[in-house]
Image (cartoon, rainbow, N blue to C red):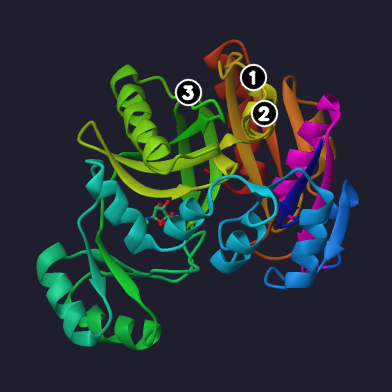
Amino acid sequence: MRIGIIGGGQLARMLALAGYPLGLRFVLLDPAPDACAGQVAELIQGDYDDREKLAQLADRVDVVTFDFENVPAAAAHFLEETVLVYPPPLALEIAQDRLAEKTLFRELGIATPAFAAVDSLETLYTAVKQVGLPAVLKTRRLGYDGKGQWLLRDKADIEPAWRALDGVSLILEGFVPFLREVSILALRDRHESMAFYPLVENRHRGGILRLSRAPYEDIALAQQARDYAGRILQRLDYVGLLAIEFFVLDGQLLANEMAPRVHNSGHWTIEGAETSQFENHLRAILRLPLGSTAARGYSAMINFIGELPDLNAFLGVPGLHFHSYGKAPRSGRKVGHATLRADDPAMLEAELGKLLPLVGVG
Ligand code: AMP
């Protein structure tokens, strides 16, 4: 079986690496000639809306999937005419627009932060009245890792924020003084079976994920997350892996956003779960039986942002698994990660405590 992947970043790279033991082959489409997944799979260099390149890809594979969600919807629909495409392009379209995403959550009875659409200074003032301050003004589209966001602390922040983000469609969200952030990785296969990984606790800095710990053990929250995820999977007739990020406030989940793809907060599953998110995504889209999502002990995943740390400092640590994505260092770029796995949570924390200062996470 051959799988086409739109996007050739680290997620595509890890999908390919997970697929080889199953005998799968991969073809990627990415505009960058040095896309890092091109080191481990065949790369077609081309823009995501280049019909000729899309047709070339579709011709050579049995199924197409994505390594990022900002694939033009028209490209996904074009592919769908000739080849199986999972997850469904509808899921991409919704996840590309924060307003559509939060509206879907609300329709499905999934709690979210307060939100309102903004498309003029006037509607921004109305939204502030509705949502209250402090609030976060975000671009509806093409925001990721905290990009395109503006915190409004008080009324004096309104007009500068509007001027900075003027001209694009926006969403205003109530600022959530959350206790923690968690995510769930959920799967639905082509037989409509669903499976869920344990909850993950995530720490961000500057809008970028720095550290994930799993499993985050809270029976009530895990049940709520599975229930919410199940509603989304069914509504979208979803196939593949879906990640949903939540804020935890007063013992309840508030949905922040979803990603219709394998997700950074699931990298720990490579060593920390019976079956990795990458392998299970492939199994789901290929109509193969899903593998167990059970955790193997306790895991912590540290992201390497900008540059890799000294290998010597990391490789000597028991239970540590190092992943370099083969990317050149660049500020703010995800260039690798490490997962620390242990059978005992206290042991995990002891080793983690020594590593975190080395990557600037307190
Ligand atoms: P996002 O791009 O929406 O995932 O936002 C990136 C990070 O910014 C989140 O993981 C939070 O840490 C923070 N953030 C986003 N929206 C809010 C909000 N409404 N209230 C508080 N923090 C937020």
| Snapshot quadrant of residue 111 | top left
Image-based side of 269 in relation to 149, left or right: right
Choose the circle earlier in sequence order: 3 or 2.
3
The quarter of the image that holds ligand 1 is: bottom left
- Which kind of residue does numbered mark 3 sit on? Pro
How many residues crowd around disc 1 within 10 Å: few (fewer than 14), some, or many (20 or more)? Answer: few
Dot 3 corresponds to which residue?
198
Question: Which is in the foreground here, disc 1 or disc 3?
Answer: 1
Amino acid type assigned to the residue bearing label 1 in the image: Pro
Which residue is more in the foreground, 191 or 101?
191
Residue type highlighted by circle 2: Arg
Ligand 1 is within 8 Å of the C-beta of the residue at disc 1: no
Q: Residue 16 magenta-drawn?
A: yes
Q: Which mark is residue 41?
A: none
Point out residue 298 in the picture as x, y percentages from the top left corner: 57, 19
* Circle nearer the N terminus (1, 2): 2
Check contact, mark 1 vs mark 2: CB within 8 A.
yes
Task: First in sequence, mark 1 or 3: give its number.
Answer: 3
Give the labeled residue for mark 1.
Answer: 289
Secondary structure beneath label 3: loop
Secondary structure found at label 1: loop
Q: Which residues are magenta?
A: 9-32
| As drawn, 232 above or below 345 | below
Q: Position of residue 93 (x, y in %)?
A: 47, 60
Q: For the point 35% across and 30% down, which residue is it?
A: 225
Residue corresponding to mark 2: 283
Split into 4 quadrants, where in the image is the N terminus?
top right
